[in-house]
Image (cartoon, rainbow, N blue to C red):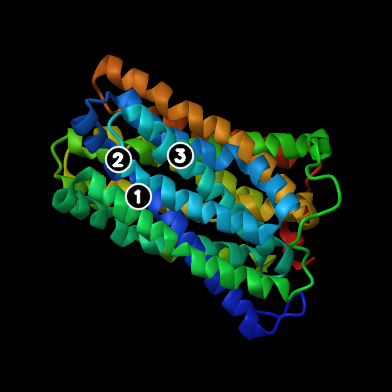
Amino acid sequence: MAEEKGLSKLNAILIVACAFWVNAMVMGPTKSTGVYFLPYQQNFKANAQQASLVSSLLYGFYFFAGPLASISCHLIGYKYTSILGSVLASVSVAVSCLSQTMDVLFVTMGALFGLGSCLAMTPVYALLGQIFTDKRPLVNNIVTIGSAVSGIPLSLTVQLWLDEYGLAGSMLLMGGVLLNSLPAILALMIMGEKTNVSMSAAKKKVFDFNILKNSGFTFFCLASGLHVASTVTLCSYLIRFAQSIGIGNYEAASLSSIMSAIDICLRPMTGYLTSLSHIGNFQINRFYVIIWSLILQSAVTLIFPFATNYAAMIAATIAFSICAGATGALPITLLAELFGSENLATSLGLRSMFVGVFSFATPPLVGMVVDATGSYVYPFYVSTALALLSSSMFYFVFRCCGITDDATSDIVTT
């Protein structure tokens, strides 16, 4: 990893390692909450719409609170924003063990958990975006692997906790896992302060909405919202669908672990390949990587409704994970490169707001259809449609908003 922002190779590796651990301890638990869908229905007599609303609020607030996290970075600095988020996420999940109704879980496991995760992660991504330039795609993909690494054991471990300690005990233990992000946050921010990157409270305008005047940025955010909503919808209902066709709890939970394992394999490869401008005589165009990955993802998603056994579910999950993993952290990388790393905290916040709207609205609306029909196949049809719309929107950004082929192949070397 080349020296950047005055960092030695060792310090650069340590910064990436700390960011990796933060992602593992914050986003790993976030992605493992799909196991709770059935316990919500069993313990609180919740219908599909109510059970999905917890995940919807979690992902919705994680993304929608992006502008708040950006403002906080400007007002109190990266370090204190990330620390506040880590503590809030841990405490909100831990106190969920006291919940007696779904309404309480909407606040604790949904809104507050999502808000805390957003506050913890936004400063981390913003710091990495300012420190690394030449290897930004590779760094972003390495860091985001963290959630996959922790997600492999967590999905099955959460099911084990549910069997051994019940829903309340499982949530208390999950809160403890989240708190493990705090030491890495402290180490990361201390090392970040030794660079020439500004991490303290800013004197300038805390949030600049002028970037929304750039039509390319607005459509990029809309495409990102559709993209994430397609994945969130599938992940919210994947385990419950598997259980509905007679697959056991541990086997169903293992599908999430399979997705994480494939993610681990693909993200470094994606990060490395997309950090290159050419492979031989072939020009790497990062927008086309996203567009074609989403098209293939939409086709693969249609396999799930026709899966009738565990083997078929594994095959469909592997195919979906390959397509989804091919995009890696490209949207965040392109955000920094196309619209400026100096305003990354602001652009991340606004993009997250768009993504949050889609992530919040989609699963509960799909849940209404599931409750009305009694079938869990419809989330996969919705996910397919959202992925296709997203690919079309990314293509529109690429072709109609002044972004050239050269821009998407050369930006990583600027």
Residue ID at (78%, 51%): 343
Pointer 1 or 3: first along the chain: 1
Say what secondary structure mark 1 lies in: loop
Q: Which mark is residue 58?
A: 3
Q: Which residue was labeled with disc 2?
A: 98
| Residue 356 vertical position relative to residue 120 in the rendered view, above or below | above
**Amino acid on which the number 3 mark rests in the picture:** Leu
Q: Which mark is residue 32?
A: 1
Q: Closer to the camera, 316 or 147?
A: 147
Point out residue 354 in the picture as x, y percentages from the top left corner.
Answer: 62, 34
Between the residue at mark 1 and the residue at mark 3, the CA separation in whole angstroms equals: 12 Å
Point out residue 97 in the picture as x, y percentages from the top left corner.
Answer: 29, 43
Say what secondary structure mark 3 lies in: helix
Quarter occupied by residue 132: bottom right
| Residue 10 vertical position relative to residue 235 in the rendered view, above or below | below
Q: Which mark is residue 191?
A: none
Q: Closer to the camera, 316 or 207?
A: 207
**Amino acid on which the number 2 mark rests in the picture:** Leu
Whether residues under marks 2 and 3 lie with C-beta atoms below 8 angstroms apart, the answer is no
